[in-house]
Each structure stands twice: as structure tokens, then as C-alpha cells.
Amino acid sequence: MTSVQAPLEKADAFGPLKRFVSRRASWIPVFAALALLILIFIAGQAYFGNFLTPRVISALLLDNAYLFILAVGMTFVILTGGIDLSVGAVMAFTGMFGASLLRDGVPSGIVVPVMLLLGAAFGLAIGVLVQYFDVQPFIASLAAMFAARGLAFMVSLDSIKVETPEILWLQSTRIQGAPGSFYITPTGIIALLVVLVAALVLAYTRFGRTIYAIGGNEQSARLMGLPVVRSKLLAYVVSGVCAGLAGVVFTAYTGASYPLNGMGTELDTIAAVVIGGTLLLGGSGFVVGSMIGVFVYGTIKTAISFMGADQSWTRISVGLLLLLFVVVQRIIVARSDRR
Amino acid sequence: MSTAKEARAIVEMRGITIEFPGVKALDGVDLTLRGGEVHTLMGENGAGKSTLIKALTGVYAIDGGSIIVEGTPREFRGTADAQLAGISTVYQEVNLCTNLSVGENVMLGHEVRGPLGINWAATHREAARHLENLGVRLDTRSMLSAHSIAVQQLVAISRAMVTDSRVLVLDEPTSSLDRGEVDQLFGVIRGLRDRGVAILFVTHFLDQVYEISDRLTVLRNGTLVGEYPVEDLPRGQLISKMIGRELDELDAISQSAARAIDRTSDPVIRATGVGRRGVLHPADVEVYDGEVVGLAGLLGSGRTELVRLLYGADRADAGRVEVRGRTARITNPRHAIDRRIAFSSEDRRAEGLVGDLTVAENIVLGIQAKRGALRKVRKSEQDTIVEEYIQALGVRPANPNALVRNLSGGNQQKVLLARWLATAPQLIILDEPTRGIDVGAKADIQRKVAELSEQGLAVVFISSELEEVIRIAQRIVVMRDRRKIGELTSHDIGVDDLVAFIADEQPQPDSPESAA
Amino acid sequence: MKKILTHRLMLPIAALVALIVINTIARPSFVSVTVKGDQLYGPLIDILRNSAPLMLVSLGMMIVISTRGIDLSVGAIMAVSGAVALTIIDGSPTPNDLGTVLGAIGIAVLIGMLLGAWNGFLVAVVGVQPIIATLVLMLAGRGVALLITGGFITTINSAPYKFMAQGYVIGLPFAFFVSVAAVALVALIERRTALGVLTEAVGINPEASRLAGVRSRGIIWGAYAASGVLAGFAGILYSSNTMAADSNAAGLYIELYAILAVVLGGTSLMGGKFTVAGTVIGVFTIETLRSTILFLGVPSAVAPLFLAVAVVIVVLIQSPRLRSLVTRTAQGARPNTSEVAR
């Protein structure tokens, strides 16, 4: 029997760098995003002088906690090669529904699980349309977005104030070393926990690996006998649950629910995920990258408010960054196709 | 080579019948796979090879017949069922996930798990062990995309062995490998065979068939031709069994083909050393006015690849093309069309017709594209053209407003031919224009080609049916293993000579990768 | 052909007729048209008038979808074009001058075209997926519009501009004539030239079209540019209706309504065959649905819920799986193919 050793020798011959590239190529976009983030930090600090303070950094996590959670769910869906446009609207609807229940005196121990279940139901509905009826993910999640937005307004046309102490506690509690130093709120802890759990699930469970396999080549995944249908449904459910959880966090953050919450948030989320290095074609990307993408988004927003410039610059900058990353991705894909 | 003559049958497929809407893809086909044997499945395009494989691997449900695995009748509802029965498949386009690591691809779905999820260290160790069983040593943590197709094939085979498969189906695994890689693969296959695995092998490369197989099953047009021990079936016989003999009378066409061609002036097209790395060794072709040049060779021999380069459907990276003595740069189809070169693809549905448009719209599409969007072919003009070609080619139904996708294969081919003839080409390239169509339509098309060439049109004609090529062409360019191996004049040879030429036992050439 | 045409448009026509019948039964005033002065009033007239921006956008969307694409940026382009036109008029010393207004409209529509061409460039040349390529502009476009108006809602007084959406000609809203003109123009350009059939060919089978010599790149590019022009004009109509450049509200969700109108009108999201008539019917169906929802006393904010239901019904009807499920139950056949062989 002949023995194939060439690739191993090659790796040795070109040293650790080559070896790193052959093993960890998919992390490169994440590092690119990280480099971008650091660049923005440095530029901000150089320009404003008081940019990199514990207060600003802590606020990044606080202000964008909901976005971290949404981005995690979106990462699952995009990794399978799909997309979920409903997250902003589902977040608004679960927030509204939850707030109305709380107003009616339902204990938060029931309300929060109900919100998560509602989100899961939306995710499941999208997944069923995509998986069983061959509806494009774009259209299926669009319908869910319409439905959720309409339902949010059906709950109430006006904002509902939330006075439940447990919910507000999520936001108001600040765990802080010393006055003026870094702090974190329970919402921030939830966001980081979600990122951590999702990262572990994607890296260390068969479900997670199946998600990557589907995104890499769905046909192959089927032929390998992996549970494609179940995993894809579950990816949308994860995104739905994340949207529900974001509903909880966002309600806590604003102390009220408003049916117009999260307008356009789905676009911010997608942008953050893509900037964080996840390929829109699926199969490549990490929740850690998405987290960095959200940080980039949040930092740009903060920088723009520091400048006192119009917040419309946020969307413009994020749009341009998205363009840059998509074109770069396109070039990378085109190059690997040629090979 | 055949080690276990009376080996135990692991899989018996009996009377397998599969129907697609309107077509019987397989009709009562038998296949027996024995442990410790390499069994090769042979047949031209459309013979039913891939359908049979898909029945065996659970992709298609069978409409008739039975599949017996180790004495137990089985019914496969999906690929997972077949895998559970011990049947694994390695497909031509390696069906792995290139975005994951080598080890992961071997172990996906079978990862070693601990209390905290997947134990990656153990999983990679296990993967390395499976790879090493095949004599392959790789960095299992490297990305699959970093490796060649050949290595990916081996990874796919290792994966199949993780589930302890007793039957391994290899669907054209060698089509994109070079010689050295093929040797590695064959080494692995022999190793598995000696361990008692039953191997079903599909390839278009005759040399490889005789190098590795113990037994052959030949299919033609969805039916079984027969099963033969490899030593009982020499090449010539194998090819005639695959191709079959069509004994209809088309003497008029033969007479037309016997015409003398004026080769004194510049040819319509002269290609010198046209090739593309990994696709086709540089080849020379020229076609004169009124001449039909046949391209003969088996599928995958480079015949389609050559004409696609001539037409600019794919870019050549070597060689020079002259049209009527003037250098022509043809890098996309429009360049070819501007020089009045037309090309009818072998894949009518995917690359020829626009299925949801009507017959009339499909026929004028060529003229329309040439004129540009703004100068629309007027209704009256369109009616005249469409009417003319429907008549001339006998398109049925003779309804210009029928959707093309609802037509039979033969009529679709006629529509495609009409599209190109309507553009008044000086050279038309017809890739398998008679494939999968009924005898009447075949004769119609051949007659039309002969008639057009008599009127001065230059034609390149590709067909798997060698009689057709001999009948219609003045000159035949013979291809094998992605290179041109020679040229014959058709009126002094018969099918047997051509078969012998194609099958000619010669050392297998290097891969085009190294040559181009 | 006649048969196919009727078949293709049967669903949208039936939906529209059903809606009109239900409305008429529920409130007979629905079909009544009253004359005040020399102008016509009534719910149907309102539908004709209000549907104009959606009509323009849907026509552009139809062409883009026919190439197997999608244009999410139409709402943002509307916002930009409205902002441009109003800012020009606002800054002009003669806002009531017809020349000023026409110039402003011309520039705004030209910018719409450039934005559309930019989308086309990303899709046809760079090869970015249409959803993402147009998402970029969808994200950034409204921001740009806000910058143009300086973050404010620019309001103007300009009689000629106001006439665009609110004026009447021979008793009917001028906006209605604009949409008739757009429909006629699109139908003429697509069907009188070969553009329509070449667009369909590219959408149905890109590879066959390429081998047949169709300039698919130019056709795709042109489709997005056309969508940009039409969205630009829709932005003018929208801002003329409110006489304000509200960059956040202009054309909000219109891309979704337009996609729905096109799909309702029988054009598949997978590209290919399109009919202008179908899209027109789709637009009127949606506009009638909106009017109905409003009449039912449902807050307009809740209307998306009904649209969601409509979207789901339409995609389910289009779903091959559902169709094969129906046929399969009818025939009792059961291939494994849908699992793997797609």
C-alpha cells in the first residue's frame, strides 16, 4: 500500500505560519475584525483623548447587550447559509407581550419563559417554511417579521412601562470594582453568557458541527447521514429564542416596551455578524467574531455621538464597512473557487 | 488480479426498475457485488449507471426489483438506511465539507464525546488512525480545502470506513486525479479489497478499468448488457457492448460524407495547440468549408472540453485560433458568435434551451442576442423564421407557442439547432446532438447536418455513437484521456477500426496538469 | 398562450375581485364615486392615487426579480431622491417656478438611477449576492438622505411640486396618470424591444443565455438601474404627497410590499417570466387590502400582520413541495429524491 505524506511534510517545511494558515484559515476574518476594532479604539482615543475610559467601554456592553444576543442567534442561522430578518420585530413583539403580561401582574418567573417560547415559536415557523416548503429564508423570515411587527402593535399601539423590580434589576444593578472603574450589569452578564454558551455549543457538540457542515455543503451533509433537517430547524429556533431573550434584555434596558423597538435592528445584526467574519454563504464564522462585530458597531456609534455628528452616520459607516467586508469575502470565495 | 472468483455475494440487486416521469431510467437491471472484489460498472452517458448507484445508496427509491444485502431484503428510504446496511459512497465531486478539518470530515457524526461535549483530541486521534489504516498520514487538524482532490478522495474513503462499510461505491473517483494520485487511490482500493470489502467502481477511463477491476457489468440505455469477468472481455468488445450497434439505413448520408472537400483555401477555423491546464492537453483542429469533422472518443476524453474552448464557453490558456486565416481572440461566447460560430451544448436543458420560454422565443434568441435588445426581431419576421425552421427540421408539435420544456428531447434538439441555423453561422459545433432522442429524430438531424454541409456549412460533430460519426463526417479527430490521439479519414474505416483506435493499448499519458 | 396567460393571472385577479366584492358588500360606499367640483372622490379613487409610488417601485422590482435578483434598497432610494428634490427646491429662490421643480426632479431621479447602477455594479460585475448588495444601500441610503436634509424633515411650499401627488387632471389624480405612464413605458420598453424576453432568458437560465450570446451582465445592470429610476420617481411622489422629506418614513417597508406585489402578480422569486399586467394587479390588490384593513378599523400599524398572512399563503401556493405533496397524495408515488437529489 502506498503512503500519502506529502501534506504533512509540506506543513513542516513551511513552518508554523503555514501550519496555522492550513488549520485556522477561517479565523483570519475574525482577526481582521479585531484589528479593525483596535484601530477604531486607537483612532478614537487619539482624536477625542477621553475615548478609552472604563465608562465608555462598560457602556458598550450595556448599550448593546440585546444586539450581542441577537447576533449570536443570527450567527447560527447564517452559518447554515440562511438569514433571519425577523429578529428585530420578534424582539419588539416579545417585549410588548411580556410587558403587557407584567402590567397585568403575571409574575416575571412565568413571563420570561413565555417570551423565550414565543421567540422559539417564530423561529420554528420560519424553519418549517424554509425546510419543508422550500421557501427562501429571506422570504420566510420576512413574513415572520411582518407578523411579529403587526402583533407587537396589536398588543398596544403605545409603549408599555415596565415596573417589575426583577426586570429592572437586570439593568440597574452595576457590579463595579471601584467608583469610576469598569462595571457590568446582569444584562451584560447574560449577553456574555449567551456568547460563551453558543461558542461552546458550536465547537463542542454534534449539533454545532452539523451547523457548520450544512453551511459548508448541505448536500454533503445529507449524504454523510447528518441530521440536516433537525439541525436547520433548530438553528432558526435558536435565533428565535435569542430574539425572545433580547426582548427581555431590551425591555429591561429601556424600562418600557414600544412596538417600534428594533426597527432595522435585523440589518444592524446582519451587518455586525458579517463584519465579524461570518461568511454569508454559510459554513464559516464564529460567535466570537459576531461579538467583535457588535463591538465594532457599538464603538462606531459611540464615536459618532462623541463627535456630536448626526447618528445617521452610524448606518452609513456600518453600511460601508459591510460593503468592504462583503467585497473582500467575495474575492476570497472567488479565489478559492478558482483553486 | 481476480483473487476471489467464488467470493460471497454481499449485495444482490435483482430486476431493478426505476421510472421517471415518462422515462424508464432502469429496466430490470441486475448487479451482484462480492466481497474482496472490485466490480466496475460501465456504460455511456444515459446508460443508467448513476441511477443504479443512486438506487443502491438509497438516493432513489426503486419502482421494481429487490435489493438484498447479506441475505436480507432491504428497502432504502434514504442514504442513512443504506449506510446502516453497510453501503458507503464516495462521489465524483467529493461530498465532504471543505470548510471543516480533515479529521472532522472523517469523523462527522461519529465524534468521540466526553461528558463536556466532543473530545477533539481523541476525535483527531481516531481520525488519524482511520486514515493510517489506509496508509494515509495527514495533519488531521488542517482544513480539508487545503488538500488536493486526490487527498480529499482518500479522506472520503476513510470516512466510509469509519462506519465499517462492507460495500464501498466509488463514483468516478479518478476523473480529476493525475497518474500518481490514481496509483495512490488504487493502492488504497486494493488494500480494502484484500480486507474483504466489496467495491463498486465507476470510471470512464478504460485503462483504469483493466488495471483495477475483477469483474464488469455493462449497461446500455437503462438495460443490462451483461456481467463479465474482466479477462473475458477485451477492450474492443467492451466498447461495442457499451455503444451498441444501430443498424438503420442512412446511405444517403454516407454518400454525402464521401464528398471531396476543398482544402486549398484557408479553413473556417484552425486551432493550434489549444488547451487548458487540468482540462485538455493542447490540441490542433481545423475545419474547412462544407466539411463535417467528427470528434470521437468516450465521455471525458476531452471532446466536449475541446469544443467549449473553441467556442469560448471556457477560456483556453494555451494555443491560437484563426478564423479564415485571421487570428481570432475567442474568450467568451460573444466573440465566437461575432465570427459566426455556433455551439449547441451536450446538455440541452442546462446549457442550451431556456425552458420556460416558447419554441419561437428560443429559436429567435440567437438572432436577438446577436442584434442586441433594442432591435427586436419583429413579429412578422419572427413568424417567418420560426415557421421556416419548424418546417425544415420537422419540430413537433409544430406550435411556435409551446413551452420548450414540454417538448421531447429530439424536438428540443431541433429547436436548439434552429436557433443557431437562424443566425446563419459559418461553423456550427454540435455536441451530442443525437443523445437521448428517438431514432426518427436522430435520422432527421443527421440528414439536416449532411444537407447543410453540402451547402457549404462547416460542422464539428460529436457523438458517442461511432457509426453516426463515421457516417456523417469526412474526417474524425479521435480523443482519449483529454488529448487528441489522432485523425482518421472516415470513408476508409469502419466502426471496428475506430473502436480499435480509441481502445488502442498505449501507456496512459500523464495528466494534463503536468503537461499543460 | 391565451390559456397560460389566464392561468398565470388567475390567482391575482381572483384575489383582487374577491377583495373588491367583500368591500362592496361590507360598505356599499366603497365603489361609489362622488364629484366635487371637477374632481372625483371615493375609496377607489384613493386607491388609484395612493398606489402610485408602490406601482413605480413594483415595476422596477419586477424587472430585477425577473433576472433572479432582488432590490432591497428601493425604500432608501426613495428617501434619498425625496431629500434631494426637496433640498434643491428649498434652497431655490423660486420654489414655485416650474423649471426649478422639473430640474430638482430630474436631478433626484438621476441620483436614483446612479444608486441603482451602483447596485447593478455590485451584482453583475463584482458578483455579490443581490440581497446583500442592495442591503448595503438599504442600510446606508437613509443615513445619506438624513445627511442631505441635515437631519431635519425638510418641508417646502411649492405648488408645482405639490401637484405631482395631489393635483388633479380631468377629474383624476395626477399621480394616477404618472403610474399609468410608468406602466405604459415599462410595458413598451420591455415588450416592444427584446429587453423583456432577454431579461427573462437570463433569469430562467443564465448559462444557456450566456452560451446563446446574450449580454447578461448589461441586462442585469440595466435592471437595477431601471429599478433605481423608478424608485427615485416614487420618492418624488411620496414627498410631494406630504410636502416633506422625511428620510425615516419615506418608502419604509416599500421594498417588502413591492416584492409581495410582484410575487402576487405571478412572477416567481426564482426569476424568469414576468407580466406587467400581473404586477399592476398585484399592486392594486395590496392597495385594496390596505384600504380594507384601514376600513375594518385595524390600526394601520397592525396591517403588516395581514400582509404576513398574505405572504405565507402566496409562498405556500408557489411551493413545489406543497404541489408535489398534493400530486403525490393523488398518485401515491414516493420518490426519495426530494431528500437528497435536489
Image (cartoon, rainbow, N blue to C red):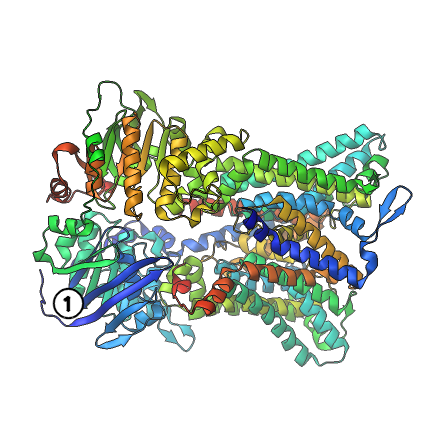
A131 vs A214, nearest the viewer = A131
**Residue C237: x and y, percent?**
76, 42
**Residue A241: x and y, percent?**
59, 70
- As displayed, is residue B240 above or below residue B393? below
Which residue is drawn at the image coordinates 65% and 65% (left, top)? A90
Residue at the far top in the pictured view: B265
> Would you identify the image quadrant in which residue B26 lies?
bottom left
C166 vs A319, nearest the viewer = C166
> Would you identify the image quadrant in which residue A53 lies?
bottom right
Chain ID, mark 1: B
Q: Which amino acid type is shown beneath numbered disc 1? A: Gly
B339 vs B92, nearest the viewer = B339
Q: Dot 1 lies on which element?
A: loop
B472 vs A235, nearest the viewer = B472
The C terminus of chain B lies in quadrant: top left
The residue labelled by disc 1 is B36
Within-10-Å neighbours for mark 1: few <14, some 14–19, many 20+: many
B277 left or right, relative to B385: left
Which residue is drawn at the image coordinates 81% and 53% (left, top)? C43
Disc count in the image?
1
Residue B276 at least partly seen: no
C185 left or right, relative to C176: left
The N terminus of chain B lies in quadrant: bottom left
**Residue A175: x and y, percent?**
65, 71
**Residue B130: x and y, percent?**
25, 67
Residue B13 at least partly seen: yes
